[in-house]
Image (spheres, rainbow, N blue to C red):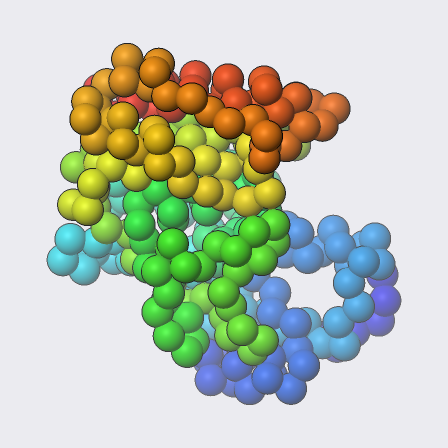
């Protein structure tokens, strides 16, 4: 690990000022700390956002649940507000990593990192959420831009995410047993704008599947998934699973998610 300065500002303005001058924001540290240990990252200063109280918390605003970027996974999983309004989101948070990861990892850190097998991006995209940043608001469909890539500009950080409350929703994940990341995870939601299906773990980033969405819009049932073709040509193939196996998992996990959402 290389030497670096460390600062823990108490206000968002102070944090942004330090980030603007080259500081590396530190959220939960579940990816960044590992990168530092392996000397894959060399920041001159870490700006720990844990001291910015305004970046954490959960509240309901009209027909949406707003969650601060520094809210820990375990807080989302245990929130009575989230459990009542979007139980699928609470369940997703409760299935991330292990207890230690859930105690330290944050919503904003996970979404900003945009790991191609992470769980939260599937919820953000599947629910059609809005990402609030220090500069603007970004629709989920515009935010994710491929492997570890997002619409965030240099110096811009996520401050909160607003999740519209769906009529029905569920998340089904087939875990990679060692990492507990999603080999394939599918978030299905019936929203005011229609059915949305977001898939993580299968490609180079989270993505929606128009064919599954169209089928489920016609009949929100597990059986509707059977007639949908899943193209394996752009899916991941590695030592854990072939692209063809992942394509089949997408259908299986979508069926499971729909069955869960229907209750």
Q: Quadrant of residue 19?
A: bottom right
Q: Can see residue 53?
A: no
Residue drawn at point x = 56 percent, y = 78 percent: 155
Q: Quadrant of the C terminus?
A: top left
Q: In the depicted view, which residue is nearer to us: 167 or 68?
A: 167
**Whole-percent x and y of residue 90?**
35, 38
Q: In the depicted view, which residue is nearer to us: 211 or 138?
A: 211
Looking at the image, residue 22 lies above or below residue 191: below
Residue drawn at point x = 40 percent, y = 36 percent: 209
**Whole-percent x and y of residue 260?**
29, 21
Looking at the image, residue 50 lies above or below residue 76: below
Q: Tell me if 162 is positioned left or right of 148 in this view.
A: left
Q: Tell me if 168 is positioned left or right of 22 in this view.
A: left
Looking at the image, residue 119 lies above or below residue 158: above
Q: Tell me if 20 is positioned left or right of 214 in this view.
A: right
Residue drawn at point x = 16 percent, y = 45 percent: 192
Q: Tell me if 76 is positioned left or right of 16 in this view.
A: left
**Whole-percent x and y of residue 123?**
38, 43
Q: Can see residue 208?
A: yes
**Whole-percent x and y of residue 215?**
27, 26
Q: In which quarter of the image is residue 1?
A: bottom right
Residue drawn at point x = 71 percent, y = 28 percent: 238
């Amino acid at each position: 690990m290389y030497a670096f300065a460390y600062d823990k500002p108490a206000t968002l303005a102070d944090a942004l000022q330090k980030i603007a001058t080259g500081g590396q924001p530190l959220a939960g540290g579940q990816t960044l700390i590992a990168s530092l240990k392996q000397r894959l990252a060399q920041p001159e200063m870490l700006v720990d956002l844990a001291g910015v109280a305004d970046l954490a918390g959960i509240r309901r605003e009209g027909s949406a649940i707003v969650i601060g970027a520094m809210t820990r996974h375990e807080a989302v999983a245990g929130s009575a507000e989230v459990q009542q309004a979007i139980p699928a989101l609470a369940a997703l948070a409760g299935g991330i990593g292990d207890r230690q990861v859930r105690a330290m990892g944050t919503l904003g850190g996970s979404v900003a990192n945009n790991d191609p097998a992470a769980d939260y991006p599937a919820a953000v995209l599947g629910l059609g959420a809005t990402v609030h940043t220090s500069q603007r608001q970004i629709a989920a469909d515009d935010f994710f831009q491929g492997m570890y890539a997002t619409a965030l500009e240099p110096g811009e950080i996520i401050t909160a995410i607003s999740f519209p409350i769906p009529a029905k929703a569920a998340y089904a994940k087939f875990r990679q047993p060692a990492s507990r990341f999603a080999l394939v995870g599918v978030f299905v939601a019936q929203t005011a704008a229609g059915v949305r299906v977001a898939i993580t773990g299968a490609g180079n980033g989270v993505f929606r599947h128009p064919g599954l969405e169209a089928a489920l819009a016609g009949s929100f049932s597990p059986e509707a998934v059977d007639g949908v073709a899943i193209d394996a040509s752009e899916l991941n193939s590695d030592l854990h699973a072939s692209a063809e196996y992942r394509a089949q998992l997408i259908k299986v996990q979508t069926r499971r998610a729909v069955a869960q959402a229907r209750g």
